[in-house]
Image: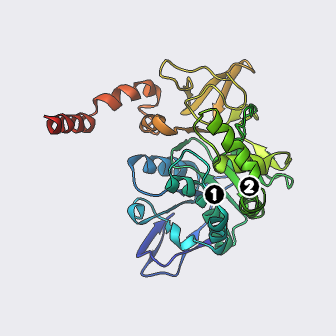
Amino acid sequence: MHLRFKSANFSSCIYNGFVNIGRLNHITIKYKGKGNKMNIPLFIFHVGYIDYLRLALTTAKKYNSDVLLIGDESNKRAWKPHLMKDELNSPVYQDFLKVYTKMSSYNSEYDLLIFERFFCLREWMNQNNIDKAWMLDSDVISFSNFYDKYSRYLHNKDIVASLSIPQHQDNYRWAAFGHNSYWTLERITSFTDFCIETYSKNLSLLQEKYEWHIKNHILGGVCEMTLLYLWAKGKTDVFNTAKVYDGMTIDNWITSSENFELNEYPVTIGGIKQITFKDGIPYSFNKKLGKDVAFLALHCQGSAKKYMRFFANDRLKDFYQLAPVWELVRPQRVRNKIKKLIKKV
């Protein structure tokens, strides 16, 4: 099977041993599995360049044959294959922008980017006639081929998407997470259409949540997680990766004891899930089940990004709790602090 990724900006592409040189209208990539694993394309969306982006990409590539970065000018040299997000700026996304109303404590640029990635995924799958794909955030460290591990569930024709959805949804939490999610073209189309329809025809529902945040002085509001939750609510064809299946799960966010249930996993003094590595795979003790559970990925969101360098390195994995210390003493950080002190003087 070959995947033809549409692009007009590649001067060269080296991928899986196949090389295309010159100014190309399409990039043809040999889509092949590793061993007996089931493989579908994996997609990471990121704007800007920062060191941890490469960690997310390289660990994903370790277990998945086809990993695509959709980004911008600043990260086009960070990974091949790479597509500019503006090439996927579809009429559907423009329709969304016409009805979108900001109702969160995020800055406006970020608020839109977290929605835009879903519309980019839809357009990319449409352009390239791709029926199934996996979407990953750029602060996720991978330890598995997700589609292969969940194949016995995702091959079921009644399962057409996966999200991470915590059980606890009180007080207008209304949150489902797409940081590590499986999509069919049918369902990414359904979700993005739902976003447009909700903002245009059911805005009062979103305003209800936003007003609760304002009234109670709580950060957050309405974002893509809200729409994912409302879209998935009541659906039986959305697989929930926050739950434990066959002794494994996917991390929602490493800075919480919660995954599917509250207080589900122990946390370290540093405030992240307590992890033990076995044969290179992270495990944590599930207090509800009374046994260790394998984590197929760790989500190092926010301030936890400092742990990514440790989790991605086989020699450093077991010493991940030293990440906060390293963050304080690493040479570049010390130099920056000295510069700030000099400026103050």
Q: Which residue is mark 2?
A: 203
- Rendered image quadrant of residue 99: bottom right
Residue ID at (51%, 23%): 271
Image-based side of 332 in relation to 101, left or right: left
Residue 311, visible in the rendered structure: no
Residue 202 pos. (x, y %):
78, 56
Identify the residue under disc 1: 101
- Which SS class for mark 1? loop
Image spot of residue 15 (x, y percent): 49, 65
Judged left or right of residue 35, residue 69 is left
Q: Are marks 2 and 1 in contact (CB under 8 Å)?
A: yes
Compare marks 2 and 1 and give the one earlier in the sequence: 1
Q: What residue sits 57% from the left and 49% below the top?
A: 63
Mark 2, secondary structure of its residue: helix
For badge 2, the amino acid type reads Leu
Across and down, in percent, residue 243 comes to 74, 34
